[in-house]
Amino acid sequence: MRRILRTPLGKKARVWLWRHARAVLSAPRPVAVANARWASRRPLDRRYREEVRHALKQMAGGVERCMYCEDSAGHAIEHFWPRSRFPERAFCWENLLLTCDRCNNHHKRTQFPLSLQGEPLLVDPTAEEPGMHLELRPREGLMLAREGSAKGETTIGVLGLNRYELRKGRKIAWTGLQALVERYGRFKEQDRAEEAALCAGTLTGHPFPAVLEVLLRTAERADAEQYVDPECLAVLRSHGSDLRALLARGLSSQAAPVSPARPL
């Protein structure tokens, strides 16, 4: 999971959300009204719901990966605060995320643990830096709670962030991304701009973008040689700033990258 910048929503779509939110707040049965209005098949509702989905896909960047697992393509509009428990937030733009079916319907569902202070114990990647609570060890494919963070542990458990396919995918990404970086470096050295650009596009659209961030951060470490292939490390140290800029543009995020204390 990585930090995602929430971008502004179009004015008409914001008004559409506001009108539905107002109706829910004034209803005697807010959950029923929120569910009915969210599922409405009226052309206007379908139009603006798709506009919301499109805006979320633009925020996700790359090839529109799930904002939770970063593996599968995101297609579901997820209510971070579940609509069935918090209907007043059903039409709040800041409460909407883009997720895959596995994360949304098979893991999180309506689970939403709260602290004693009533604060969410799940990480919202659009509202906070996930790296404050989560750290990635890509060679093992593991997502860990940073320094025993309760929010990190709960997020991993509720969303199933260490399920088998995610651990396997992160390990594959750690190796595959290094090979892509090496290829990018060779194209740059040979002044093959078109091939370098295509390779850069593959890098920024790769599943598990947080793994690429860890790779870039690891290259800055004094002991980076222990973890990164020599050719890849040389490219990262020569062209790291270019790759960071490409990653920021390709994933529509201006937030600080994950800063793992024990990334490997």
Image: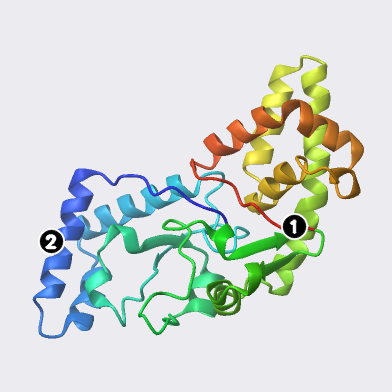
Q: Quadrant of the C terminus?
A: bottom right
Q: Position of residue 81 (x, y in %)?
A: 36, 73
Q: Is residue 171 depicted above or below 216 in this figure?
A: below
Q: How many marks?
A: 2
**Hey, what amino acid is under mark 1?**
Pro
How far, Cα to Cα, is label 2 from label 1?
45 Å
List the residue tagged with mark 1: 263
Residue 74 visible in this rendered orientation of the protein: yes
Q: Quadrant of residue 154?
A: bottom right
Q: Quadrant of the N terminus?
A: bottom right
**Hey, what amino acid is under mark 2?**
Arg
Q: Position of residue 147 (x, y in %)?
A: 65, 70
Please report the residue visible at 49 percent of the width from the left and 63 percent of the height from the top: 99
Classify mark 2: residues with Cα within 10 Å, few (<14), some (14-19) or many (20+).
few
In the rendered view, does 193 fall on the left or right side of 44? right
In this view of the protein, which residue sits in the foreground, 246 or 102? 246
Q: How is the image coloured?
A: rainbow
Please report the residue visible at 83 percent of the width from the left and 37 percent of the height from the top: 233
Q: Position of residue 101 (x, y in %)?
A: 52, 69
Q: Quadrant of residue 39?
A: bottom left
Classify mark 1: residues with Cα within 10 Å, few (<14), some (14-19) or many (20+).
many
Looking at the rendered structure, the secondary structure element under dot 1 is loop
List the residue tagged with mark 2: 19
Q: Position of residue 178 (x, y in %)?
A: 81, 42
In the rendered view, does 90 fall on the left or right side of 186? left
Q: Is residue 112 depicted above or below 173 in this figure?
A: below
Please report the residue visible at 35 percent of the width from the left and 80 percent of the height from the top: 118
Nearest to N terminus: mark 2 or mark 1: 2
In this view of the protein, which residue sits in the foreground, 199 or 123? 123
Please report the residue visible at 31 percent of the width from the left and 82 percent of the height from the top: 85
Residue 184 visible in this rendered orientation of the protein: no
